Amino acid sequence: MARRQQRYRRTVGMVVAGCLCLGAAGCARSTAVTGGAPADDPVRMLHRAADALVDAGSSRARTSLEMATGGTRVTIRGEGVYDYRKRLGRLEVLLPQGAAGTAARRPIIELLAPGALFMKNRGAGVPADKWVRVDTGTLSDGNLVTGGATDPFAAAEVLRGTREATFVGRTEVAGTRVRHYRGTADLAEAARDASDANRGPLAAAAKGFATTEVPFDVYLDGEGRIRKVRHRFSFVNGEDGERVEPVAVASTTLLYAFGAPADVRLPAREDIYAGRIAAE
């Protein structure tokens, strides 16, 4: 029992410590709407989904990561804005109550940038006015789940590796009519076709996850923009030679309010904490 609790605390602590994090739940309820299949090839359409976000410029975003381990389900939620042209985002990520041994905690503020993840309210011993910077090039998951949220543009670029996809039907997400597609993407192929900002991180994820195959469900609006995407990643959470089964992580990203202001400013060098971060 003590060993199981220790493993649970270690797994949840990965989110806060900038190591591998945890998976996601759904963000919006869908309502079925009738209609025929579109004429466009689903695979080619999904390869272009990230480009449609760049054309849109910016949006608001909600994220969710969910993972079950040791009989306990952990859900981490985030909300914020993203600028697809500058590849900059700002999220407030809320850990579940009791995940770090406390009844409640302040949201972790995350700034997403090419090659870096900045976090405030990030860990014990970090001054309240300081940021922690993580080099995403050093993360074995390519920062797809490390911060407790998937970078919205990285989530879209995973679809560049779509190998197969089928049209499921027409439905609604948050009041918007969308087309639902289901398929599988390959992280190595996504990395080859990704933007410069995400090529390295996605290549790292292709090596770091238990498998390069990523099943997904995605919902596109009439302009080809992602309104909701749900990925199912798989990683191995073991250490010291411990044999464990791969852990499934579900990451869901909901995008809305396209064109919303997304003025994201990265912290100055003197505002970045360089000291030791205590374990929680």
Image (cartoon, rainbow, N blue to C red):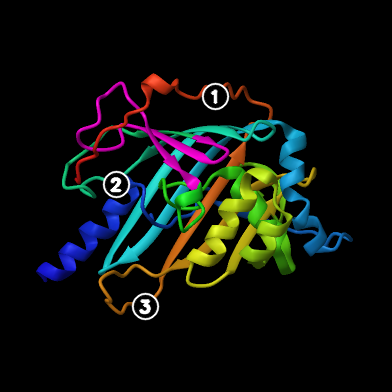
Are the two marked residues, 3 and 2, in contact with CB atoms closer than 8 angstroms? Answer: no
Q: Position of residue 153 (x, y in %)?
A: 62, 44
User: Which residue type does callout 1 highlight?
Assistant: Val
Cα distance in 3D space between marks 3 and 2? 24 Å
What residue is shown at x 24% (from left), y 25% (from top)?
Answer: 127
Q: Which residue is mark 3?
A: 245
Location of the N terminus by quadrant is bottom left
Q: Position of residue 72 (x, y in %)?
A: 27, 63
Q: Which residue is mark 1?
A: 264
What residue is shown at x 59% (from left), y 68% (from top)?
Answer: 215
Report the disc number at residue 96. Answer: 2
Report the front residue among 124 and 174. Answer: 124
Is 134 within the magenta? yes
User: Which residue type does callout 3 highlight?
Assistant: Glu
Is 252 within the magenta? no
Cα distance in 3D space between marks 1 and 3? 39 Å
Q: Which contiguous range is marked in magenta? A: 112-136
